[in-house]
Image: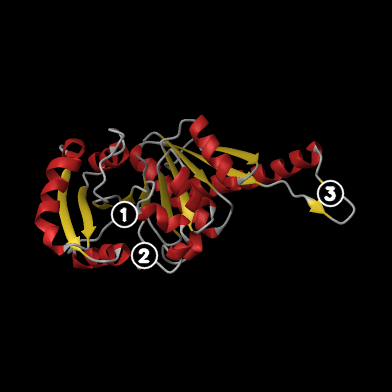
Amino acid sequence: MKKILIPTDFSETSKNALKYGADLAVALGAQIDILHVFQIPVSVSDSYVYIPDQEEIDGITKAHLAELELIIKEIQQYNPQVKNIQAACVSGIPFEEIKEYSKKQSYDLIIMGLQGLGFVARHILGSTTAKLFTKSEIPVLGIHKHNEFKGFKHILFSYDMIPFENDHALKPLVDLSHFFHSHIHVLNITDKAEELTQMNEMLEAKYLKPSLVNSNTSYHTITNSDLISGIEKFIKTQTHEIDLLTIFPRKHNIFSQLFINSASKDLAFHFDLPLLVNHD
């Protein structure tokens, strides 16, 4: 990963994502760029609709760029090893602009702040981050307000036992694990206790072995009727701290439903881990 994009809305959560991203970029030797997307203010009344002219839009852009320059100075004071941060400001719908900009500029990773104390579905449903989690073609790393970068010694990969269509889908995860010498804990959760042994053998030998053959990996299949509860219980049974959770939202799987299904509003991760969302 050599190019990282960190969108910001100037909130405290996004500022912490910038700090996290700066530390990660230094560790990886990567370039980080900052992007701010603003929506053009439109005034509507019974008699008319007012849309700012280009001169006013240019003024708004200039003001936001000045804010971005201040943020760059703050980041470089926070971590002097961060060099050559580029900043951009565009108008439009945040999700659409971030998605298009990141693809056009060929970024390897997008880092976004997660609102709230805990990865709670009701807090991010409909948000820019949630949409990027499900729609971005580039991996998205979600960072909570209090997360600090400490490397990725232990990565938890929650897997749904669906074969990958893209042979390179696991590459970002594998690259990170190799760089940080991480141990990948592959976790499958099932509600069928009688299939535990068979599923664990299939998990290792058939589904993931080719992609993870050179990785430090262990495979786990546990029983639980609830995905979130299963992940939480697995984490609590480990003797080491999990540094990163990674998932692959795909059509019709439970991970995508966490972000788009209103029935998931009461589902929550009761842990506050950085969340890496990849796509097949």
Q: Residue 214 vs residue 251: left or right?
A: left
Which residue is located at x 52 percent, y 30 percent? 104
Residue corresponding to mark 1: 245
Q: Secondary structure at mark 2?
A: loop
Which of the pair 118/228 is nearer the observer? 228
Residue mark closest to the camera, 1 vs 3: 3
Which of the pair 252/20 is nearer the observer? 252
Which residue is located at x 64 percent, y 48 percent? 67
As drawn, the label of residue 269 is: 2
Contact between marks 1 and 2 (CB within 8 A): the answer is yes
Which of the pair 140/264 is nearer the observer? 264
Kindly identify the amino acid type of the residue bearing the numbered disc 3.
Answer: Val
Residue 203 x/y as whole percent: 16, 47
Question: What is the crowding at mark 2: few (fewer than 14 residues within 10 Å), some, or many (at least 20)?
Answer: some
Which of the pair 261/112 is nearer the observer? 261
Kindly identify the amino acid type of the residue bearing the numbered disc 1.
Answer: Leu
Q: Secondary structure at mark 3?
A: strand
Question: Which numbered disc, 1 or 2, marks the residue that appears first in the sequence?
Answer: 1
Give the alpha-carbon distance from disc 3 to disc 2, as whole Å.
Answer: 43 Å
Question: Which numbered disc, 1 or 3, marks the residue that appears first in the sequence?
Answer: 3
Give the alpha-carbon distance from disc 1 to disc 3, as whole Å.
Answer: 46 Å
Question: Which numbered disc, 3 or 2, marks the residue that appears first in the sequence?
Answer: 3
Residue 107 x/y as whole percent: 45, 34
Residue 115 visible to the viewer? no
Residue mark closest to the camera, 3 vs 2: 3
Residue corresponding to mark 3: 49
Which residue is located at x 53 percent, y 59 percent? 12
Kindly identify the amino acid type of the residue bearing the numbered disc 2.
Answer: Phe
Question: What is the crowding at mark 1: few (fewer than 14 residues within 10 Å), some, or many (at least 20)?
Answer: many
Question: Which residue is most to the right?
Answer: 47
